[in-house]
């Protein structure tokens, strides 16, 4: 054993390297200076267990428990806390020995390095074997092992490779960035694809521009693509600059503005409803413009310039709150020119449709112009009833595209399997309406009930005249419409229905009789289509391929 002021280590074989005796002191937590000694037998046993572990041998539980019980007594004079804390304290104490002896005696510091390395290796040996099948609490398992443990939709999305859609804020930011880049290109230099991207960006942002665009027979996206062709980017580099809202409709892309008047936007419904009294003259200005703010994505201004107001009027205007404000601008004058061009093209299309219609093809140009002004485009889906039998037609319609079918209800006697007859009401097809055909003129003008019901067989685009618009026409034109038209399918009478019903029923019975005869003949003759002589004749290419294979087989034999 060593003396009270030294630490004695015996020579113990560790692999092929001997351990020499060194001297040093260990600082303890309980006393300033305590001398510890290592037992030769205990250290020899520990080294043997470590060599067994390094060689890959499995340590028995008895040896492992004995190691844990003896190792904690090598360096500590008292048992404190858990075994894991003792091992950590030993490691920190050993590092303290090296630092203390190095500052006191450089020679002793060098001689104590093998002791610290040996004890660090013993510390690794003392660590318990890791158990990879760690037990977790439900919260730990949900947070660490399996994310979204209780979320079934998350795991179903992983199975089916379903991508999570972006949130509205993410779409808004991406669309805003794309919009700012595209608007830097001048309108006459943009391609059709770039204008379509501008329109899609406005849709993704759910911009207020969508609400201000008037309704048209074109879809919202088609109309928005045309409006995107005249959209420009305005940049205001200084603060407190005035943006005149009577020049057009503006949407904020960067920065913010303060409105000078309220309301700051003139909506489409205000123009149609005659509520322009909101923008009275002289323009009442706000006392504190900073009280209200127009942020990114919000709109101000108008698509239709206010009458009797200059473009530099302060009505609907706003003031920039900081430098570098960017605005999307749709000029009122450019928008009005666009609407005029679209209306002119729409008017020419209505005139062309009227000339296709047989009843109006010989009309004078002035009367056609008058009717074209009151026509409205309406799209109907498939299988929708336009006119109900024995009711007044709701409008006069001319089919521009698609097909409609006319039906008439009739009373028939139906023969049952038992031989009895019963009365039934059937719907009978009496005709179709295609492109360029009209309906409902006499029913609307003379307030007569329709003799048939009309349904859409496909999606239908139709130009219609409502009874309210019909009253706006010149009486001469209305009289001309009445004289040029006849009731829709007015030629259908009871005799025609009877003959047509007998013909259709005879054809149906004949088809049913032929099907029964053919089926019974095939069944009695035991004919199996697709086999034997009832197979489909082979083409010349197939016959040549079969002959070639036969020759190859004969050659092999």
Image: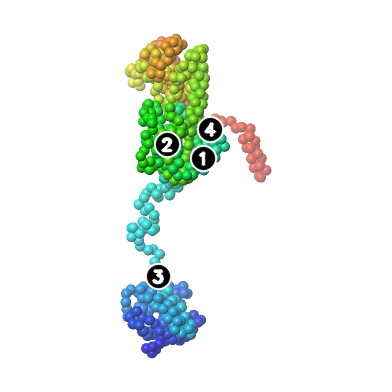
- Sequence-first disc among 2 and 4: 2
Cβ–Cβ below 8 Å for labels 2 and 3? Answer: no
Of labels 2 and 3, earlier in sequence is 3
Disc marking residue 129:
3
The spot of residue 172 in percent (x, y) is 44, 43
Sequence order check: which comes first, mark 4 or mark 1? 1
Q: CA distance from mark 2 to mark 3?
A: 76 Å
Compare marks 2 and 1 and give the one earlier in the sequence. Answer: 1
Dot 2 lies on which element? loop
C-alpha separation, residue under disc 4 versus residue under disc 1: 65 Å
Q: Earlier in the sequence, mark 3 or mark 4?
A: 3
Q: Give the residue number, with chain letter if any, for mark 1.
A: 183
Location of mark 2 (residue): 317
Circle 4: element type: loop
Above or below for 414 versus 79: above
Label disc, if present, on residue 134 of the rendered structure: none
Q: Nearer the viewer, mark 2 or mark 3?
A: 2
Q: CA distance from mark 2 to mark 4?
A: 81 Å
Give the colour scheme shown. rainbow
The residue depicted at 40 percent of the width and 84 percent of the height is 25
In the rendered structure, find residue 530 and report the number of the disc placed on it. Answer: 4
**Mark 4 surroundings within 10 Å by alpha-carbon count, few (fewer than 14), some (14 through 19), many (20 or more):** few
**How many angstroms separate mark 3 from mark 4 (CA)?**
73 Å
Q: Residues within 10 Å of mark 2 (few under 14, many from 20)?
A: many
Q: Residue at the spot x=43%, y=29% of the render?
A: 309
**Vertical placement of residue 109 versus 317, above or below:** below
Q: Quadrant of residue 288?
A: top left
Q: Report the Cα–Cα distance between label 1 and label 3.
A: 66 Å
* Image location of residue 426, percent across then percent down: 37, 19
- Which label sits in the foreground, 1 or 3? 1
């Amino acid at each position: 054993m060593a003396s009270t002021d030294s630490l004695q280590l015996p020579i113990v074989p560790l692999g092929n390297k001997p351990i020499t005796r060194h001297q040093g002191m260990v600082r303890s937590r309980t006393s300033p200076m305590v001398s510890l000694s290592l037992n030769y037998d205990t250290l020899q046993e520990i080294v043997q267990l470590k060599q067994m572990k390094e060689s890959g041998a499995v340590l028995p539980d008895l040896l492992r428990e004995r190691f844990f019980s003896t190792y904690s007594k090598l360096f500590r004079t008292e048992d404190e806390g858990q075994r894991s804390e003792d091992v950590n304290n030993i490691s920190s104490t050993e590092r303290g020995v090296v630092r203390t002896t190095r500052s006191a005696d450089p020679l002793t510091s060098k001689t104590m390095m093998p002791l610290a390395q040996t004890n660090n290796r013993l510390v690794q040996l003392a660590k318990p074997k890791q158990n990879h099948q760690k037990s977790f609490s439900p919260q730990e398992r949900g947070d660490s092992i399996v994310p979204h443990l209780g979320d079934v939709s998350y795991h179903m999305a992983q199975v089916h490779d379903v991508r999570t859609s972006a949130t509205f804020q993410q779409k808004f930011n991406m669309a805003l960035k794309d919009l700012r880049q595209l608007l830097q290109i001048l309108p006459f230099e943009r391609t059709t694809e770039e204008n379509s991207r501008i329109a899609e960006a406005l849709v993704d942002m759910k911009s207020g521009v969508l609400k201000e665009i008037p309704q048209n027979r074109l879809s919202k996206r088609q109309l928005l693509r045309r409006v995107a062709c005249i959209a420009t980017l305005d940049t205001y580099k200084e603060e407190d600059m005035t943006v005149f809202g009577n020049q057009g409709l503006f949407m904020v892309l960067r920065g913010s503005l303060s409105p000078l008047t309220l309301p700051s936007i003139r909506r489409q419904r205000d123009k149609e409803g005659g509520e322009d009294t909101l923008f009275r003259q002289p323009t009442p200005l706000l006392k504190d413009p900073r009280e209200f703010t127009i942020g990114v994505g919000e709109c101000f201004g108008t698509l239709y310039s206010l009458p009797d107001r200059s473009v530099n009027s302060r009505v609907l205007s706003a003031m920039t709150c900081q430098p570098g404000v960017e605005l999307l601008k749709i000029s009122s004058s450019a928008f009005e020119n666009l609407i005029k061009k679209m209306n002119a093209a729409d008017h020419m299309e209505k005139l062309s449709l009227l000339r296709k219609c047989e009843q109006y093809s010989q009309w004078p140009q002035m009367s056609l112009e008058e009717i074209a002004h009151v026509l409205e485009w309406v799209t109907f889906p498939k299988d929708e009833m336009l006119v109900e039998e024995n009711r007044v037609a709701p409008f006069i319609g001319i089919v521009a595209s698609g097909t409609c079918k006319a039906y008439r209800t009739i009373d028939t006697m139906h023969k049952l399997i038992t031989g009895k007859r019963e009365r039934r009401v059937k719907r009978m097809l009496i005709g179709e309406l295609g492109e360029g055909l009209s309906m409902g003129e006499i029913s609307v003008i003379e307030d007569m009930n329709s003799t048939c019901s009309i349904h859409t067989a496909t999606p239908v685009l139709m130009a219609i005249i409502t009874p309210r618009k019909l009253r706006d026409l010149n009486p001469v034109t209305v009289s001309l419409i009445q004289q040029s038209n006849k009731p829709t399918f007015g030629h259908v009478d009871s005799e025609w229905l009877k003959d047509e019903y007998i013909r259709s029923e005879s054809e149906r019975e004949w088809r049913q009789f032929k099907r029964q005869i053919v089926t019974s003949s095939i069944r009695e003759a035991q004919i199996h289509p697709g086999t034997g002589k009832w197979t489909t004749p082979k083409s010349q290419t197939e016959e040549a391929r079969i002959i070639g294979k036969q020759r190859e087989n004969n050659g092999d034999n």
